[in-house]
C-alpha cells in the first residue's frame, strides 16, 4: 500500500494542520515533502489555518495567537514540546519541524473585524516563539501586529528573540492606542547554563539589550525569569546576578517561576539530564513527583528572587513590580 504524502506540486493549496497530522501519521516526516530545509537544518512546512485566535483555558488571558508551531530555539525544558504530539510528531521534532501559518494575518483580520469581536487582549507567543529566526523571512508576527493595531486590540508578547526590536515602531503605535506589553524571557544570565539549556537562542545580554531599546521606545516591557531550572539556574548567586542585570537594563517588572515538566516534556528533559547532567537525575526524581516541582522548593526559589529584587532595588524603587 502506498504511503500517503502531501503533494509536491506548487499549485496545491497549503495543507491544514489536520492534513499535516494525517500525513505524518501515515508516512512519518517523509509525508511532508514540501517542507523546506533551510540553513539552520530545520524543515519549514507552510500550512493554512482556518482560525487564528485560540481560546485559552485556565490562563490569565482568554485569547492566544501563535504564528508558528515548533521553535528552533530548542530550549531543552520547553513546555510547548508537548503540543507536537497533537500533530503525530515527537517532542524532539518540536525544534526541527516548524509549521508556518502563512495565512494567519488574513484569518486574524477576518476575526477581529467582526462586529462581535470584544477587543479583549491577545497573548502572542504562548506555545511557540513569535520572534524565532524564521520570522525575519516570513514576517508573520509583524503582519499580525499590524492587524491588531488596526483593530484597536491590545496585546502582549512573550519572546526570547531580540528581533522584537525590529517592530518597535509598531509596538510604540500600539502602546499609544489600545496598549501592548512585551515580556522578554531571560531565565538567567549564567552563560554556561544558557548554552546547554537554550542552544538556539540569542544570549541573555542581547535579550536584555532588546528590553532596554523597547523601554526607550516607550513600550511597556518586562522580564520573565522563567523557567528557573533546578541545578542550573536556581542558586542564590545566579539569581542575584540575573536580577542585577535585569534592573540595570531599566526593567521594572520581573516575573519568575520554576520549570514544570508536563507529560512528554518530562521524558524529553530526563533524557537530556541523562546525557548532560546524570548526577542531577536522582534529585529530579525526588523533586518532580508531579508536573511541577515540590511546593516547598518552588516557594524557596521564588523567595530568593524576591529577596534579590528587594536588595537590588533598595527603598527608592519600591514602586517596581514583580510576580
Image (cartoon, rainbow, N blue to C red):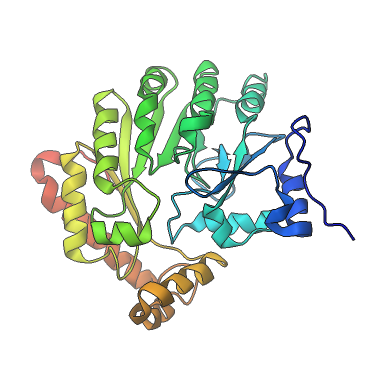
Tally of numbered tags: 0
Give the camera-side residue of 50 and 103. 103
Which x, y percent locates residue 137? Answer: 50, 31
The quadrant of the rendering that contains the N terminus is bottom right
Question: Residue at the left extreme?
Answer: 315
Compared to residue 30, the image places residue 34 above or below, namely: above
Q: Position of residue 153 (x, y in %)?
A: 51, 24
In the image: residue 46, left or right of residue 40: right
Residue visible at 55% across and 25% down?
A: 119
Residue 216 on image: x %, y %? 24, 25
Q: In the figure, is residue 237 to the left or right of 226?
A: left
Nearer to the camera, 28 or 296: 28
Q: Is residue 242 above or below residue 182?
A: below
Whether 195 is drawn above or below 132: the answer is below
Image position, residue 302 (x, y; %): 29, 60
Extreme residue in the bottom direction = 282
Res 307 seen here = no
Q: Residue at x 62, y 27 (%)?
A: 108
Tell me if 223 is positioned left or right of 136 in this view: left
Residue closer to the observer: 248 or 21? 21
Quarter-of-image position of residue 12:
top right
Q: Nearer the viewer, residue 3 or 106?
A: 3
Name the residue located 45 percent from the left edge and 54 percent from the top edge. Answer: 74
Quadrant of res 107: top right
Residue at the image position 13 percent from the left and 45 percent from the top: 313
Question: From where the camera sits, is residue 37 visible?
Answer: yes
Amino acid at each position: 500500500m502506498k504511503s500517503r504524502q502531501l503533494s509536491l506540486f506548487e499549485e496545491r493549496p497549503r495543507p491544514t494542520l489536520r492534513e499535516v497530522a494525517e500525513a505524518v501519521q501515515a508516512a512519518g516526516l517523509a509525508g511532508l515533502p514540501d517542507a523546506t530545509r533551510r540553513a539552520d537544518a530545520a524543515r519549514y512546512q507552510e500550512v493554512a489555518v482556518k482560525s487564528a485566535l485560540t481560546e485559552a483555558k485556565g490562563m490569565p488571558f482568554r485569547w492566544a495567537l501563535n504564528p508558528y508551531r515548533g521553535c528552533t530555539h530548542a530550549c531543552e525544558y520547553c513546555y510547548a514540546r508537548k503540543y507536537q504530539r497533537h500533530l503525530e510528531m515527537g517532542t524532539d521534532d518540536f525544534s526541527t519541524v516548524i509549521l508556518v501559518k502563512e495565512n494567519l494575518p488574513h484569518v486574524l483580520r477576518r476575526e477581529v473585524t467582526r462586529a462581535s469581536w470584544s477587543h479583549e487582549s491577545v497573548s502572542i507567543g504562548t506555545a511557540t516563539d513569535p520572534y524565532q529566526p524564521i520570522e525575519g523571512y516570513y514576517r508573520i508576527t509583524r503582519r499580525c501586529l499590524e492587524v491588531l493595531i488596526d483593530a484597536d486590540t491590545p496585546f502582549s508578547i512573550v519572546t526570547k528573540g531580540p528581533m522584537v526590536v525590529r517592530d518597535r515602531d509598531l509596538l510604540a503605535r500600539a502602546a499609544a492606542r489600545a496598549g501592548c506589553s512585551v515580556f522578554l524571557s531571560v531565565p538567567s544570565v549564567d552563560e554556561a547554563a544558557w548554552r546547554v539549556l537554550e542552544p538556539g537562542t540569542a544570549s541573555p545580554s542581547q535579550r536584555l539589550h532588546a528590553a532596554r531599546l523597547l523601554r526607550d521606545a516607550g513600550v511597556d516591557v518586562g522580564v520573565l525569569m522563567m523557567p528557573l531550572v533546578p541545578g542550573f539556574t536556581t542558586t542564590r548567586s545566579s539569581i542575584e546576578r540575573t536580577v542585577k542585570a535585569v534592573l540595570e537594563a531599566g526593567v521594572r517588572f520581573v516575573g519568575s517561576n520554576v520549570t514544570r515538566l508536563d507529560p512528554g516534556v518530562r521524558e524529553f528533559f530526563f533524557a537530556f539530564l541523562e546525557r548532560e547532567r546524570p548526577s542531577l537525575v536522582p534529585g529530579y526524581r525526588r523533586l518532580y513527583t508531579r508536573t511541577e516541582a515540590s511546593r516547598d522548593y518552588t516557594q524557596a526559589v521564588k523567595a530568593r528572587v524576591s529577596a534579590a529584587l528587594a536588595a537590588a532595588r533598595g527603598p527608592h524603587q519600591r514602586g517596581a513590580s514583580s510576580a
